Amino acid sequence: MNLTQKKKTSFRMPYRYDLIIHLCTLILAVFGLFMVASATMGLASGNVMSLMKTIIKQLAFTVLGYLGMVTMARWFTFDRMKKNITPIVSLTLVLLLLALCWEVGGARAWIKIPFPGQEITIQPSEFSKVVIIMVMATYLGDIRNLKLTTKDLMRNPLLIVGGFCFIVAILQSDFGSAIVMAGIACICFLIPYHPSLVRLQKMLVMLLIIGVVLIVWILSPMGEHLIEALPFKNYQINRFTSAMNPFADKYGTGFQLINGLVSFASGGWQGVGYGKSIQKYTNFPAANTDFILAIVVEELGIFGFLLIFICYALIVGRMFIYAIRMKSQRGRIVLIGVSMYFFIHFLFNVGGVTGLIPLTGVPLLMISAGGSSTLSVMVAVGMGQAVISQYRQGKIE
């Protein structure tokens, strides 16, 4: 193969990747671009330049995300991951700490990058979710030495994941992202088998079950008084009370959720038509980010939601199928970690927008406006595609 041929194939997906996952990712990315454009119309308030800047920025990050996905799909191997995990973790830590220098919307979770005509922000916590998957696969997957103790195995993962979550939750005040990071790490921890980990894994399963039961109880009428006793800040407590009854403060903490519910009711099955949402013009502050699903349903109806749901389900389902088939624990951790990245974001965003759970500020991946989340999740898909490609070629079992 000559140099010209190498250049032509350098940005193609690797041999024997999963075409369905690839197509679903592209559909979500393109669909997200159109919905961001529509939802931003209300926020732009007739300012065409502001609208165009948002669309161009989202398009740029989507293109970068695709290039990142292809690059990761071609570059990623377990040997390279193990060799480069220390500099990757170090860089992520530096970026997380660097974000503390700026405050955006009450949180110190973004790095501001000056750009002609518009300020661009990067959210390092999104990339840390991908790094956590790498960390769990590197330090816990395919461990052959059965004499290693629990302390030996858990030292690095606990320090790294715990450090990331502490910075994001406490220092950056981004509790939603920290929960997602911890959730991904917990699920990844349940996958590898090692005699020293079995007891901890059983305890974690019990804690997860207890946690789910407690959350359901807190959100029930019986847990209403318990919410006020929780060691949360006022705005976090308000998210619980709004989820339970948004009409208790319909012009305050419940305003956003009520607007979302009105959008759902207005959309019905077929929606009012693309670009014709009314709610996005009614001072709907997160119409193109956290609450973009409400605009999707209002304009495109339940069919618009089903398009997103089917694409998510195919991506998550197919990665689970490959994970079940392969013997490699590292491969399983990567694939299930990426699928949990999608699933947890979907669960938290849809649950928050519909009032089933408190709002967490977690975006709907590749649909919500946000360059960091789009770029990060597409790189994660590329990592999953690399594992699938290597498995289908017989390079890993």
Image: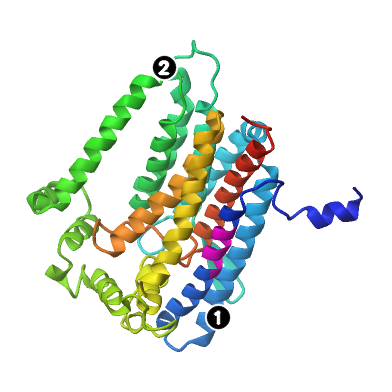
Q: Image check: 182 left or right of 319?
A: left
Q: Image check: 379 left or right of 183?
A: right
- Percent from the top left, x then y, of residue 176? 35, 52
Which residue is denoted by mark 1 in the rendering?
Answer: 52
Q: Write the residue at 35% across / 59% down.
A: 349
- The kind of residue on which mark 2 rests is Ser
Q: Image check: 346 left or right of 371?
A: left
| Structure colour scheme | rainbow
* Part of the protein shown in magenta: 23-30
Q: Is residue 292 above or below residue 323?
A: below
Mark 1: secondary structure: helix
- Percent from the top left, x then y, of residue 334? 53, 39
Q: How many numbered discs?
A: 2
The disc, 1 or 2, on the residue closer to the chain's N-terminal end is: 1
Q: Write the residue at 11% across / 47% down.
A: 226
Comparing 390 with 152, the one in front is 390
Which residue is denoted by mark 2 in the rendering?
Answer: 196
How packed mark 1 is, by other alpha carbons closer than 10 Å (few <14, some 14-19, many 20 or more), is: some
Q: Is 28 inside the magenta-drawn segment?
A: yes
Comparing 389 with 78, the one in front is 389
Q: Is residue 240 above or below residue 291?
A: above
